[in-house]
Amino acid sequence: MDIERLKVDADYWVQLGAPEDATHYSPEKEGFDPCWMKFDGTWRAKYTGTPKDSWGFDDPDDNPARYIPRPTKNDKLMNDNCLAAKIGEVGNMIHNLGCENQNNEDLSDELGMLASALWDLSKHASKEPIETEWVDGLPPVGWEFEFSYNGVSWEERVMLFNDGITCLMAHRKYPANRWHYKSDDPDIRCRPIQTPEQRQREALVDLIENRSDWGHSQQMVNELADAILSKYNVTEK
């Protein structure tokens, strides 16, 4: 059995005779035989040779984080910028977190079940690409961006919901951290995720601006920053 192919090829599951309602595969591990898995609120196992419709109620490993989720037929063709892919990506992040916490069985189990629920949800989510243009205002749902309140400091977030009245966004790297805002809050600042070069220029502009005794105009500040960066690599100490 090709485990790597099992992770991405839905047709391969059919070739191997996986039950139609199997949602995961549990690879062989010391003390545990490989088997098909199904999660419907409870982990169920089916081993080779068991009756077609017979699912056990036992969890052979008690560590769902290591199970391989069943891919959909569209997984290999799925646009990375669609809702289904975004939800699946969050599921992958939580799955990896569960793997990192295998020494805590209860936490790993909870994370594994949450990841499985997200993977299942992704199968039913839209596979149409999310809007790819963002001109002004709040970014479209699913868009990764930089957020600031009053323009004081910036952090990377992703837009989860916006009905024009309220919006919900999450931290890009830590999706469990979420915030609600009024969609028309005038203090919200959003911009595309900056490149390292853009961040370097911004830091230099801030440094020059903070030297108020220089008395430079904004245009002069920008030109001075560009002139410095055209000749020197500037790094923060």
Image (tube, rainbow, N blue to C red):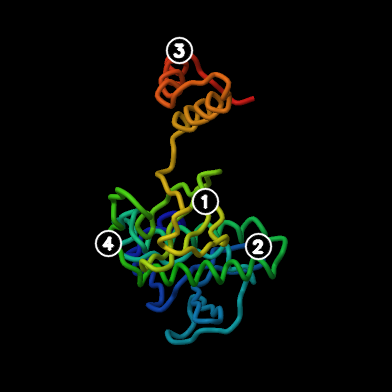
Q: Are marks 1 and 3 in contact (CB under 8 Å)?
A: no
Marked residue nearer the N-terminal end (1 or 2):
2
Marked residue nearer the N-terminal end (3 or 2):
2
Q: Quadrant of residue 28?
A: bottom right
Marked residue nearer the N-terminal end (1 or 4):
4
Marked residue nearer the N-terminal end (1 or 3):
1
What residue is pinned by disc 4? 128
Badge number at residue 231? 3
Asked whether residue 73 appears in the rendered view, the answer is: yes
Residue kind at label 1, given as amino acid type: Tyr
Using a 10 Å C-alpha cutoff, classify the residue at mark 4 as few (fewer than 14 neighbours), some (14 to 19) or many (20 or more).
some
Badge number at residue 30? 2
Residue kind at label 3, given as amino acid type: Lys
Q: Nearer the viewer, mark 1 or mark 2?
A: 1
- At a point 35% along the width and 57% down the height, the residue shown is 140
Q: Are marks 4 and 3 in contact (CB under 8 Å)?
A: no
Alpha carbon distance from label 1 to label 4: 31 Å
Residue kind at label 2, given as amino acid type: Glu
